[in-house]
Image (spheres, grey):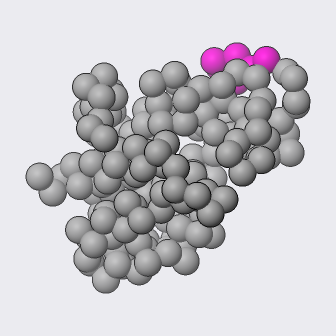
Amino acid sequence: MAMSPKLRNKIAAAIGGGAIAIATVMLSGKDGLEGREYVPYRDVVGVLTVCDGHTGSDIIPGRHYSDAECDALTRGDLQRIARQVDPHIKVPITETQRAAIYSFAYNVGATATINSTLLKKLNARDYAGACAELKRWVYAGGQRWKGLINRRDVEYQVCTWSQK
């Protein structure tokens, strides 16, 4: 899937603001990879989710969340992801590569990211191979999902942004 021009422009505008800023643009709002939902719902594997993919025991079922609350949840989640993942990145990477990794970790979890072949390839300075690993993670609950295929395509495009 090609990245929408609207999302591409938002990402381009965020470059220079750091990986969390880029990842926030990638994930947030109705046009983001997560697709903002103001009322909690169960995702494809049954996890209670709200806003831009926020999960956790702090979600109140049936409650309507505001844009400001969703923005704060996404920002906090990405800051937590960064604290968990950054110590395991041992090589220099671009902010777009880091943003793609944050988006990926936001979706699959920090532990899965830290233990992934993606991170092993990245730390071996196989940057192209690391970015290509994103496209392998398209299954949830044992099924291949079109939404995950689309998401990984966008993450791949962001990961390889500086390599073009």
Position of 138 compared to 121: left or right? Answer: right
The vertical placement of 20 against 88, above or below, is above
Classified by dominant secondary structure, the portion drawn in magenta counts as: helix
Whole-percent x and y of residue 91?
A: 33, 74
Say if residue 105 shows up in the picture.
no
Residue 6 is drawn in which quadrant? top left
Of residues 14 and 138, which is closer to you in this image?
138
Residue positioned 62% across, 69% down in the render: 111
The answer to if 53 sits in the magenta stretch is no
- Tell me: 15 left or right of 44: left
In this rendering, is residue 90 above or below 36? below
Q: Position of residue 54 (x, y in %)?
A: 68, 40
Residue located 70% across and 16% down the image: 66
Residue closer to the observer: 87 or 128: 128
Q: Which residues are magenta?
A: 64-71
Residue 25, placed above or below residue 148: above
Residue most toward the front? 143
User: Is 65 inside the magenta-drawn segment?
Assistant: yes
Farthest-out residue, left: 164
Pinpoint residue 156: horizontal percent, then vertical percent: 32, 53
Q: Is residue 1 left or right of residue 134?
A: left
The image quadrant that residue 114 belongs to is: bottom right
| Image quadrant containing the N terminus | top left
Answer whether residue 1 is visible to the viewer in this image: yes
Q: Is residue 69 above or below residue 130?
A: above
Comparing 81 with 164, the one in front is: 164
